[in-house]
Amino acid sequence: MQKGYWYAIGAYVTWGLFPIYWKLLHQVSALQLIGHRVVWSCVMLLGIIVISRQWRAFQSSILKGRALLIYAIAGVLIAINWTVYVWAVNSDFVVETSLGYFMTPLVSVLLGVVVLGERLSAGRWAAIGLAAVGVLYLTFAYGSLPWIALALACSFGTYGLVKKLAPLGAVHGLALETCILFFPALIYLLYQDNQGYGAFLHSGTATDLLMLGAGPVTTIPLLLFAAATRRIPLSITGLFQYINPTLQFLLGVLVFHEPFTRSRLIGFSIVWIALILSALASHRALREQFDNVIG
């Protein structure tokens, strides 16, 4: 198998197993974990840029055009996504986080229509409509909106849209995002420590190492993903994305024993059918493009 496939599988499997990592840090507040995730990711990414002798290129690229504004928006969106996700995992909502990432591709398609003016086939419109029915069903079943899933899907879907418009590569882009978030995150962590609530250096060696590890576990799958997208078609990379929510769903049900009632099964099944319809529509569109090129 090509290296690109292994890189993609590695990235999505790592993301799918994230709940295990964050569960090990359940005693630390979500905001502190995100602070450490930002700080140590920034340090690691800047280190990679310096070691690979890309510092001058990085400095010049971040000053071009609207890079700072675009990546400031991207940074806020990914910070929201990370915070909701980590809080949800450590509050025993892993199954609902998986629903959010199952829904993300459909949100991305809808944003493409609304913001970029892309045209959709009848199959994709049907998929979006069916997903909306699934969300409405779960809303009535829960008695409230599945806000965790919607927050994750909308924040990450919008983040993907912003990144589509962004000018930098994966490493430089993420480095700039974390640089923008670095000082607010560091100030928050220092404030928490000054108030006596800081977990770092006060919760044992294992916890400290896990918080330090937030940098590598954030950065490594992103680097794998970036390497994969350079080697294999984006359409194939897109198929691998369902590894992530599938693993999260299985962890939530089988490992963390979260309730998966009949009403949840019905709601999830509606969303899954919507994803199948969307995948079939994408496959049909790719086949038509291929036939047009051959013809």
Image (cartoon, rainbow, N blue to C red):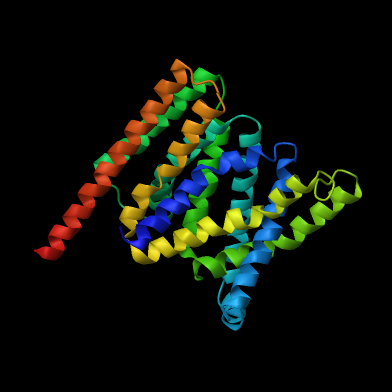
Residue ID at (41%, 43%): 243
- The single residue placed furthest to the left in the displayed view is 295
Q: Position of residue 40 (x, y in %)?
A: 69, 59
Q: Is residue 165 left or right of residue 290?
A: right
When asked about the image quadrant of residue 291, the answer is bottom left
When asked about the image quadrant of residue 277, the answer is top left
Q: Position of residue 238 (x, y in %)?
A: 36, 51
Residues 240 and 284: in front is 240
Q: Position of residue 107 (x, y in %)?
A: 44, 44
Q: Is residue 249 left or right of residue 31?
A: left
| Whether residue 172 is situated above or below residue 147 in the rendered picture | below
Q: How many marks?
A: 0
Residue ID at (35%, 65%): 231
Q: Is residue 162 left or right of residue 108?
A: right
Q: Position of residue 258 (x, y in %)?
A: 55, 24
Which quarter shows the N terminus? bottom left
Which quarter shows the C terminus? bottom left
| Whether residue 81 is situated above or below residue 160 in the rendered picture | above
Residue ID at (58%, 39%): 19
* Residue 121 visible in the displayed image: no
Q: Is residue 242 left or right of residue 169?
A: left
- The single residue placed furthest to the right in the displayed view is 195
| Whether residue 174 is situated above or below residue 22 in the rendered picture | below
Residues 217 and 260: in front is 217
- The single residue placed furthest to the top in the displayed view is 262
Residues 260 and 286: in front is 260
Residue ID at (84%, 55%): 190
* Residue 131 visible in the displayed image: yes
